[in-house]
Amino acid sequence: MAASQPIDFRSDLLSRPTQAIISAMVRAMRRPAAFGLREDADQRELEERAALLLDKEDALLFATCTAANQAALAVLAPPGTAVATASDPHILTSEAGAHAALSGLTLKALAGGPAPALEEWTDVIDAATDELRMPIAAIVLENTHTRGGGVPLDADYTLGVLAHAHRRQLGSHLDGARLPNAALATGRTLAQLARGFDTVSMSLNKGLCAPVGAILAGSRELVGRATIMRQRLGGGIRPTAIIAAAGAAALKDMSPIASDHRRAKHLAELLAQVVGVEVAIPATNIVLLRLDALKLRADEFCRVLADHGLLALPFGTAVRFVTYHGLADEDVERAARVVAAAVENSRRS
């Protein structure tokens, strides 16, 4: 990025497509479009590849991971029931209350951060219900956990949670918007991280670099029902060739994610040298900068950064930086310099 342009670290939604993705999209634009909801050849290739990688019977293209999550909740839990999640899940903080508005569901978020103790899950799953109290119908885990700073959940932990859910015959959904990041961080395959879940969503943009799109995978029966829900949500987009071709190409090459993780670690190391701030070395591509010791508000600090050409996102009491394909090493270094200067100026004022 040119020095005169702002550097945008707000989200990996801003990832730039690789040349392979661009070429696939151009090829798709040049061939005749398909009419059916699942007729397009590129879409079939994408869905088959995604199902194989996640070790599920079927997969379905969605425009966004939010839509995929909501379709999953709709098919797993009937209206008037509750869904148990870890604290601060994306489905609660960032999906505009869709679970309640669209499916009549209540979310019960556990304490304990991205990975509550198994005992916490047991207490919620086994809680007594009667005619006056709604039952838990499903559980949702998020991997990586966005508001936890991109924390990956290992397969052993998720299998432990799922064992309790299966014992009670609850539905289970994995919000795997950044599942490829979790796979790289934990050394597990996508299939290993998705094992045991009834449904799994995964973004095709973000670290995978497609410009748009997401996948919902599961059994043929559940994906068939999700196809109807997708249509109700207005997500039966046609033609799909350009979006699907980009997604299929993205699944063939996940190598950009390693560079994202490397740059996030480098950024955290540089920020850790700034006196007065707190930052942990990230496992994936999300860096959380905490300003508690400086008594600075995250939203105000982000406005100061923006005035100096650095865009970051206030995340509660922290400031979030996300690395992605399209940022360079010099962008990371410039970002650290801007933060250091802003902190120094705050001390003087």
Image (tube, rainbow, N blue to C red):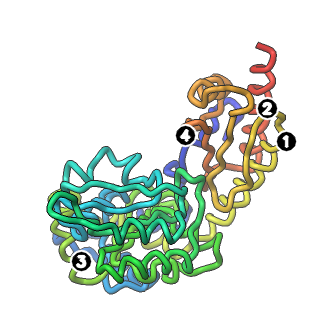
Compared across the picture, whether 117 is left or right of 96 comes to right
- The mark that comes first in sequence, 4 or 2, is 4
- Packing grade of label 3 (10 A; few <14, some 14-19, many >=20) is many
Compared across the picture, whether 256 is left or right of 170 comes to right
The picture places residue 203, in percent across and down from the top left corner, at 44, 63
- The mark that comes first in sequence, 1 or 2, is 1
- The mark that comes first in sequence, 1 or 4, is 1
Q: Which three-letter amino acid code belongs to the residue tagged 3? A: Leu
Residue under numbered circle 2: 340
- Residue at (22, 60) in percent of width and height: 134
Q: Which three-letter amino acid code belongs to the residue tagged 1? A: Gln
Residue under numbered circle 3: 222
- When asked about the image quadrant of residue 343, the answer is top right
The picture places residue 55, in percent across and down from the top left corner, at 42, 86
Residue under numbered circle 4: 315
Structural distance between the alpha carbons of marks 1 and 3 = 49 Å
Look at the numbered discs 1 and 2 and tell me whether their residues touch, using CB distance below 8 Å.
yes
- The mark that comes first in sequence, 3 or 2, is 3
Could you say whether the residue bearing mark 1 is in a helix, strand or loop? Answer: loop
Could you say whether the residue bearing mark 2 is in a helix, strand or loop? Answer: helix
Look at the numbered discs 3 and 4 and tell me whether their residues touch, using CB distance below 8 Å.
no
Structural distance between the alpha carbons of marks 4 and 2 = 19 Å
